[in-house]
Image (cartoon, coloured by chain):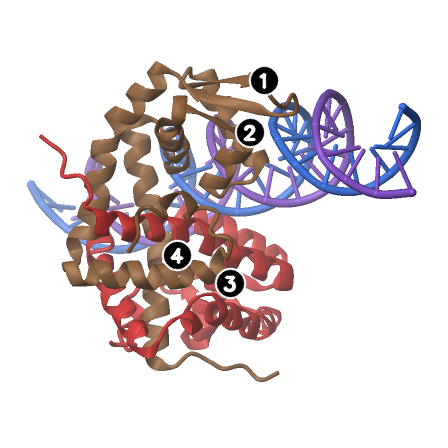
Chain colours: A red, B brown, C purple, D blue
Amino acid sequence: MDTRWLSQPELAAWVRLAAILELLPAALDTQLRRDAQLTHFDYYVLAMLSEAPDRTLRMTALAERTTATLARLSHVVQRLEARGLLERFPCPEDRRATNARLTDAGRDTVVEAAPGHVALVRERVLDALTPEQVGQLATITDAILRRLDPDARRTAIYERYDR
Amino acid sequence: MDTRWLSQPELAAWVRLAAILELLPAALDTQLRRDAQLTHFDYYVLAMLSEAPDRTLRMTALAERTTATLARLSHVVQRLEARGLLERFPCPEDRRATNARLTDAGRDTVVEAAPGHVALVRERVLDALTPEQVGQLATITDAILRRLDPDARRTAIYERYDR
DNA sequence: CCGTAATGGTTGTTGCTTCAACTATTGCCG
DNA sequence: CGGCAATAGTTGAAGCAACAACCATTACGG
C-alpha cells in the first residue's frame, strides 16, 4: 500500500493545526490552573454539572459529555470531591450507579472561573478571526468531528448550538 | 470588567474545536503507540531530527522546533536514547550544549511509522475537508497561531510551507 | 428463576509532564 | 581579568492520565 503524502496546502494546514493541538490546551490549562487551581478538564466537568438539571449527573453521563473514560473521571471526581466542589452519592434508581452533584462551593468556583476562561478563548482564538472565519471554523471542525467521534458523544448535548 | 460572552456562532465553533483538542491528540497517540511504540511527541522529535542536516540538532534547537520545555525534552530524549533511536554527545563548539543525533535505527523507526501516521491524519482530518476548506483551515490556524505563539517558534521552520 | 453476560464504577500501577532545584559553561561589564 | 548574570542542560519529586484488574448490581436467555 503506497502512501498518499500530503500536498503542500495540506501540509501547511496540518502543521499549523498540530501546533495548535500542542499549544492551546497548555494555554487553557495554565490560565485555569493559575486563576482557579483547575485543569481545563476539571473546569469542563464542573461546567457540565452546572448546566445539568439539579446540578446532578450520573458518572456515565458525565463521562460521555466530557469524552473521558470512567476511570479518568473517577479519579478527577475523587479529587474534586476532596476539595468540596462536588459530592457523590449512590443513585436511588440503579444501585450500580453513582451520581455526582455540584456543591454551592463548586458552583461559585465555576462562576468565578468562567470570565477569565472565556476571555482567554476570545483573546487566543475567536478574536483572531473574522465572523466569516468563525463560521468556516465551525463547519470545518464539525466535519472533522464526524470522523473523530462518529457518535458525537461529546457534542451531542450541544446540538442546540447548531451551525 | 464585564465579560463578553460567546455568541451562538462563536460557541458553535469553540465547542467543536475544544472537542477536537481533546480527541485528536488521543487518536494520534493511540495509533503511533500501537504501531511504533511512540507517542506523537516522540514521533515529532524523531521527525525533526530526521530532517535536520546530519540528522543532528542541539537540544535547545530541538526544543524550539517541538515547542517543548528543555526539561520535557531531556526526559524524552533520555528514553529514546535508551531505546537506541538517537544518541547524545557534547557539542564541540559550546561545552554547555548537547547534540542529539538520530541513529540508523531511529531513522528506520520514523520511516516505518510515517505512512501509518499520515494515513491517520488524512482519514481523520484532511480527507474530511474539501480543498477549499483545507485552505481556509490553513488561514484560520495561522491567525490563531499568531496569538498563541507570537514568535512562531514551532512553525518557524515551516515557513517554506507557505500558504 | 438460575446462571451468565453486560453494565456501572473504583482502584492500583505505570508512564509522561511539570516544577523547582541544581551543575556547568560562557558572555559581559566595570 | 574578576565577578556576576545568562545560557544550556539534567535530575528528582509530585501530579495527572491510561490501562488493566477488580467488585457489585442488573438484565437476559433458556
Circle 2 or circle 3, nearest the eye: 2
Amino acid type, residue under disc 1 in the picture: Pro
Residue A64 locus on image (x, y percent) = 33, 58
C-alpha gap between disc 1 and disc 2 = 19 Å
Which residue is tagged 1? B92
Q: Secondary structure at mark 4?
A: loop
Residue under the point 49% across and 82% down: B4
Residue A51 locus on image (x, y percent) = 43, 74
Which residue is tagged 2? B74
**Chain of the residue that carries numbered disc 1 in the rendered image:** B
**Chain of the residue that carries numbered disc 2 in the rendered image:** B
* Total residue callouts: 4
Residue under the point 13% across and 39% down: A4
Q: Secondary structure at mark 3?
A: helix
- Mark 2 neighbour density, 10 Å: few (under 14) some (14–19) many (20 or more): some
Residue C27 locus on image (x, y percent) = 71, 34
Answer whether labels 1 and 3 touch (C-beta < 8 Å): no
Report whether mark 1 lies on the same chain as mark 2.
Answer: yes
Answer whether labels 4 and 1 touch (C-beta < 8 Å): no
Mark 4 and mark 3 lie on one chain; the one further toward the N terminus is 3
- Mark 1 neighbour density, 10 Å: few (under 14) some (14–19) many (20 or more): few
Q: Which mark is residue A97?
A: 4
**Most foreground residue, B52 or A52:** B52
C-alpha gap between disc 1 and disc 3 = 48 Å
Mark 1 and mark 2 lie on one chain; the one further toward the N terminus is 2
Circle 4 or circle 3, nearest the eye: 3
Q: Compared with residue B62, is residue B8 higher up or lower down, i.e. above or below?
A: below
Which residue is tagged 3? A43
Q: Quadrant of residue C30?
A: top right
Amino acid type, residue under disc 2 in the picture: Ser
